[in-house]
């Protein structure tokens, strides 16, 4: 595929499901993470201060009947970045995402993709490539049914084993 649609476009075209697998313990520099690390916390009562276009896109998809699931595979003890992600996941949940966490030591016997990804309606897969230090490198789009099926199966195995967000305690 020559042109890779942006996430919002892929989500807007989804009618049933969007699943996201995240496997890194740290990602690119993020000003919100840095603010949290410096002691700033979200005022959850002031939705305008934390609600972003991403959350709106998720909420609109969920309202259309799309099930949006995310699972994060994490090392324990977690990195500061993952502790921040756990803290800010409240926004994802409030937008309608279902989020789970799988400690890496409980994933040792699963066959996993080599990078983070999104799968939309089981028909398109957007792959995210990062550098070793978590900086964004590129994205790719796959529409090969056999490849997508393998990755979707891997996601489902992780999802089944993962701990729902409200039950996962950061360690």
Image (tube, helix red, strand yellow):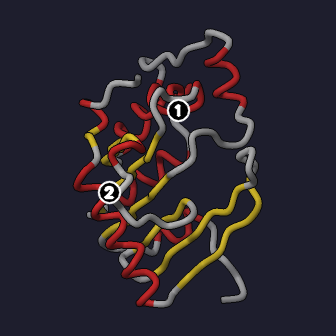
Give residue 158's mark: 2
Q: Are marks 2 and 1 in contact (CB under 8 Å)?
A: no
| Count of picture labels | 2
Q: Quadrant of residue 166?
A: top left
- Give the class, few, some or many, for how many residues have Cα within 10 Å of label 1's Cα (few <14, many ≥20): many
Near-viewer residue (19 or 150): 150
Determine whether the residue tagged by mark 2 lies in a helix, strand or loop.
Answer: helix
Up the image or down, 49 lies above or below 118; here it is above
**Image quarter of the N terminus:** bottom right
Near-viewer residue (81 or 39): 81
Task: Kindly identify the residue that appears in the image at 71 percent across and 46 percent down.
Answer: 134
Of labels 2 and 1, earlier in sequence is 1
Furthest-front residue in this view = 109
Up the image or down, 136 lies above or below 35; here it is below
Determine whether the residue tagged by mark 1 lies in a helix, strand or loop.
Answer: helix
Give residue 11's mark: none
Q: Quadrant of residue 25?
A: top right
Q: Is residue 149 left or right of residue 33?
A: left
Task: Kindly identify the residue that appears in the image at 58 percent across and 24 percent down.
Answer: 80
Furthest-top residue in this view = 39
Q: Residue 94 at what x, y percent from top left?
A: 35, 37
- Give the class, few, some or many, for how many residues have Cα within 10 Å of label 2's Cα (few <14, many ≥20): many
Near-viewer residue (85 or 110): 110
Up the image or down, 96 lies above or below 87; here it is below
Task: Kindly identify the residue that appears in the image at 42 percent across and 89 percent down.
Answer: 145
Give residue 82's mark: 1
Q: Residue 137 at what x, y percent from top left?
A: 77, 60
Task: Kindly identify the residue that appears in the image at 50 percent across and 52 percent down.
Answer: 22
**Image quarter of the C terminus:** top left
Q: Residue 57 at what x, y percent from top left?
A: 48, 54
Disc 2/disc 1 C-alpha distance (Å) = 18 Å
């Amino acid at each position: 595929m020559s042109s890779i649609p942006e996430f919002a476009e892929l989500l807007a075209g989804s009618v049933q499901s969007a699943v996201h697998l995240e496997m890194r313990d740290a990602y690119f520099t993020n000003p919100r993470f840095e603010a949290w690390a410096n002691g700033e916390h979200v005022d959850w009562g002031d939705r305008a201060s934390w609600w972003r276009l991403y959350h709106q896109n998720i909420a609109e998809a969920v309202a259309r009947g799309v099930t949006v699931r995310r699972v994060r595979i994490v090392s324990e003890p977690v990195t500061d970045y993952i502790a921040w992600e756990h803290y800010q996941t409240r926004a994802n949940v409030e937008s309608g995402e279902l989020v789970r966490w799988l400690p890496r030591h409980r994933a040792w016997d699963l066959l996993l993709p080599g990078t983070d990804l999104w799968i939309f309606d089981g028909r398109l897969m957007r792959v995210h490539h990062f550098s070793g230090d978590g900086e964004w490198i590129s994205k790719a789009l796959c529409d090969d049914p056999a490849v997508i099926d393998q990755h979707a199966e891997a996601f489902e195995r992780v999802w089944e084993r993962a701990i729902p967000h409200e039950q996962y305690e950061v360690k």
